[in-house]
Amino acid sequence: MRIGILTSGGDCPGINATIRGVCKTAISHYGMEVYGIRSGFRGLLDNDIIPLDENSLTGLLSMGGTILGTSREKPFKNRANVPVSEDKPAMMLKTIRERKLDCVVCIGGNGTQKTAAKLAATGVNVVTVPKTIDNDVWGTDISFGFDSAVSIATEAIDRLHSTASAHQRVMVIEVMGHKAGWIALYSGMAGGGDIILLPEIPFDIHRIGDTIINRLKKGKPYSIVVVAEGIPTLGGKKAAQYIAEEIEYETGFETRETVLGYIQRGGGPTAFDRNLATRMGGHATELIASGQFGRMVSLRGSEITSVPLSEVAGKLKLVTEEHDLVIQGRRMGICFG
């Protein structure tokens, strides 16, 4: 068999480890030919495809980013009134036929899963692997990259504790998560945040101010506030800036903000993510070998399995107030807004 592999959407720790897991299993165990598709779905449009062998995979396990490059190309978007010669899905199908690819492995987040599902609906054999630091892909308990991002955010929160304590300030730290607050929840709990704000849970700024004032009355002169970037704000302000300004107004306490940004996505993966990426990549190849196409690799509990791609596309996995970390946090006096 000849398989192509692409990485699409934002970069994420563990992509290269997944490429390695797919390719090594395909080449060493199943004797398949493997080709790398550069720059995501754009590589299928441009016929930008290179052969991959075992030498291509050296050093990938711990390497951040993606050796194949990535893009946010959405080939199925805005197809109305497009000439047949410029129809992107048709161009991709032409490349797949010319290259004689028996299957395309797509590594990516929600947008990638949606595009891959549409590609599968055209008759292409597709297998996908979920990739996101936000952990918001439906159908899998955890996506690789999430543990790495949480570890980086938690270390940053740990470091803010000492300076917040020394200066007796309120420190607001903004982490990634536009629609899903998984990073804020997990890093906030692991880093001992006093207030954790998520896009999924409404907050009252007056209650946040009261929480900080009450902490001072209890002899706790500083507070750590962890916010997801996607919480609602006024005036188009960034999450950390908005919350810091509102806290100063409500309490009169000196407040500073820190925005982690792309630091959460950079660098090599944690040991957990390396192993998860390796297992998911290997399982993707097993699906191909057994002819199980149109599926996304998934972690359920401790088991690597798969789910129909048609069930994944267009769905988000969000934090709920019934999550055990939210419940336990509230029992411990942590404010969620």
Image (cartoon, helix red, strand yellow):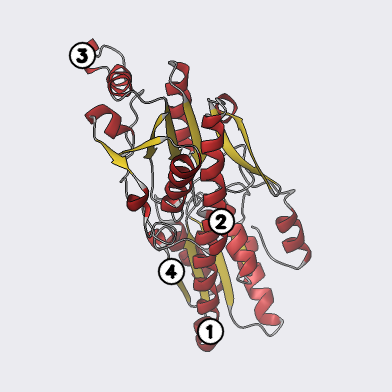
Tell me the quarter of the image containing the C terminus: bottom right
- Are the residues tagged 4 and 3 within 8 Å (C-beta)? no
Of the two numbered discs 2 and 3 in the rendering, the one whose residue sits closer to the viewer = 2
Q: Is residue 232 above or below residue 35?
A: below
Residue type indicated by callout 4: Thr
Q: Name the residue under label 1.
A: 162
> Which one is earlier in the sequence, the residue at label 2 or at label 3?
3
Q: Name the residue under label 3.
A: 85
Mark linked to residue 258: 4
> Which one is earlier in the sequence, the residue at label 1 or at label 2?
1
Residue 17 horizontal/vertical position (percent): 45, 53
> Which one is earlier in the sequence, the residue at label 4 or at label 3?
3
Residue type indicated by callout 1: Ser
> Which one is earlier in the sequence, the residue at label 1 or at label 3?
3
Instruction: Tell me the distance, in whole angstroms, between the alpha carbons under discs 4 and 1.
Output: 14 Å
Residue 184 horizontal/vertical position (percent): 56, 58
Q: At numbered mark 3, what does the secondary structure look like: helix, strand or loop? A: helix
> Which one is earlier in the sequence, the residue at label 4 or at label 1?
1
Dot 4: few (<14), some (14–19), or many (≥20) neighbours within 10 Å?
some
Instruction: Tell me the distance, in whole angstroms, between the alpha carbons under discs 1 and 3.
Output: 61 Å
Q: Locate residue 64: give its quadrant.
A: bottom left
- Are the residues tagged 4 and 1 within 8 Å (C-beta)? no
Q: At numbered mark 1, what does the secondary structure look like: helix, strand or loop? A: helix
Residue 216 horizontal/vertical position (percent): 65, 80
Tell me the quarter of the image containing the N terminus: top left
Q: Mark 2 points at which residue?
A: 275
Instruction: Tell me the distance, in whole angstroms, between the alpha carbons under discs 2 and 3.
Output: 43 Å
| Residue 250 shows in the view | no
Point 74% across, 68% down: residue: 333
Q: Residue furthest right?
A: 331
- Are the residues tagged 1 and 2 within 8 Å (C-beta)? no
Instruction: Tell me the distance, in whole angstroms, between the alpha carbons under discs 1 and 2.
Output: 33 Å
